[in-house]
Amino acid sequence: MTDALEVSGLRKTFGEVVAVDEVSFNAAPGGTIGLLGGNGAGKTTTISMLLGLLTPTAGNIRVLGHDLATDRYAVLPRMNFSSPYVDLPHRLTVAQNLLVYAELYGEPAPRERVRELADRLQFTELLDRATGKLSAGQKTRVSLAKALINRPEVLLLDEPTASLDPDTGDWVRRYLEDYRDRTRATILLASHNMGEVERLCDDVLMMRRGRVVDRGSPSELLARYGRQNLEDVFLDIARERRSGDRLEPVS
C-alpha cells in the first residue's frame, strides 16, 4: 500500500536561517501523525511545504503517490488544511465563506454540503452570521468545516481545538476520529495539546530547531523518557536535557 505522505530530506532555508533541516517521514493511509515542537521548531514551515505554499530548498514530497513539485494539481484537490490562526474574510457570512470553498473544490451540491457540515459540526445557527462576529471557538469549528468541505484524503490540522471549551474540544476530537476511521483519511496534526496528541496520534515526530530529534508512538515515547505524559517528554526535548550527544529520559 502506497503511503499517503512520503517526505524525504526536506529542507527550507530563508537566507542564512535554516527553518527545516533534513526532515523525513512517511504516513500510512488511515493514520494520524503528530508534529510536535516549540515555537520556531519548524512545524508551520513543514506544513506550508506539504501544502505547496512554500517551495522546499531541498528534498522531496509525495502525497497520495504524486510528486508535489511536478504533479501538485493532481493532489491538492484531495487535501485540505485547518488552522484557527488563518482567518476567513470577516465581512462574508459563514455560509458565503464555505460556499466559496465548496465551489473552488468543485463540490457538485455546494449548498447541501455546507448545510450538512454545519449540522454535523453544530453551527447551523451561525450560517447567516458575519464571520468576523464569531467567537474564537465558533471560528475554530467553521475553519474545520472549511477543511472538510472536499472530503479530503489528507487532512493537515494546526491546533484544531484551540479556543474550544473542554466539552466541545472532546466532541471535535471524536468527530475527527470518526472521519478518519470512516474514510481512511490520513491526518497530520500539529498541536500543543499533549492530551489531544496522545489520544489521536499513532505516530509522533518531535521537532527542535528544524530537525526531527525523536519519533515514536505516544506509548513508545513515554517509555523511552520514563515519563507519565507527553507534556513532560515535550519539556525534556524542548529544554535539551541530554547525556553526551543523545537526548535521554530524566528520572
Image (spheres, rainbow, N blue to C red):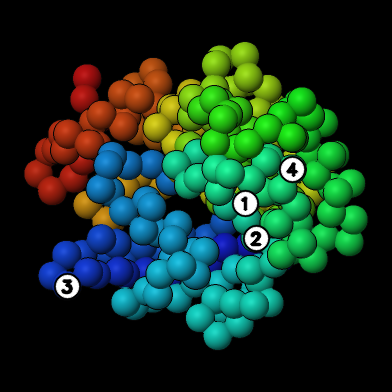
For mark 4, give the secondary structure.
helix
CA distance separating discs 4 and 2: 21 Å
Residue drawn at x 54%, y 76% is: 68
Mark 4 vs mark 1: which is more N-terminal? 4
* Left or right: 108 in relation to 232: right
Q: Which residue is mark 4?
A: 95
Q: Secondary structure at mark 3?
A: loop
Q: Are marks 1 and 2 in contact (CB under 8 Å)?
A: yes
Look at mark 2 in the image and give the residue it sits on.
79
At label 3, the amino acid type is Gly
- CA distance separating discs 1 and 2: 6 Å
Compute the Cα span from label 4 to label 1.
Answer: 21 Å
Residue at image coords 72%, 48%: 96
Q: Residue at x 17, y 72 (%)?
A: 15
**Residue 151 position (above or below residue 12):** above
Alpha-carbon neighbours of circle 1 within 10 Å: few (<14), some, or many (≥20)?
many
Viewport quadrant of the C terminus: top left
Give the residue type that dot 4 points to.
Ala
Cα distance in 3D space between marks 4 and 3 = 41 Å
Q: Earlier in the sequence, mark 4 or mark 3?
A: 3
Mark 1 highlights which residue? 155
How would you rate the neighbour count of disc 3 (Cα within 10 Å): few for under 14, some for 14-19, many for 20 or more?
few
Of labels 2 and 3, earlier in sequence is 3
C-alpha separation, residue under disc 1 versus residue under disc 3: 30 Å
Q: Amino acid at mark 2?
A: Met
**Marks 4, 1: nearer the viewer:** 4
Q: Please tell me which residue lies in front, 221 or 200.
A: 200
Question: In this image, 183 relative to 61: left or right?
Answer: right
Separation of marks 2 and 3 at Cα, in angstroms: 30 Å
Question: Residue 206's image quarter?
Answer: top left
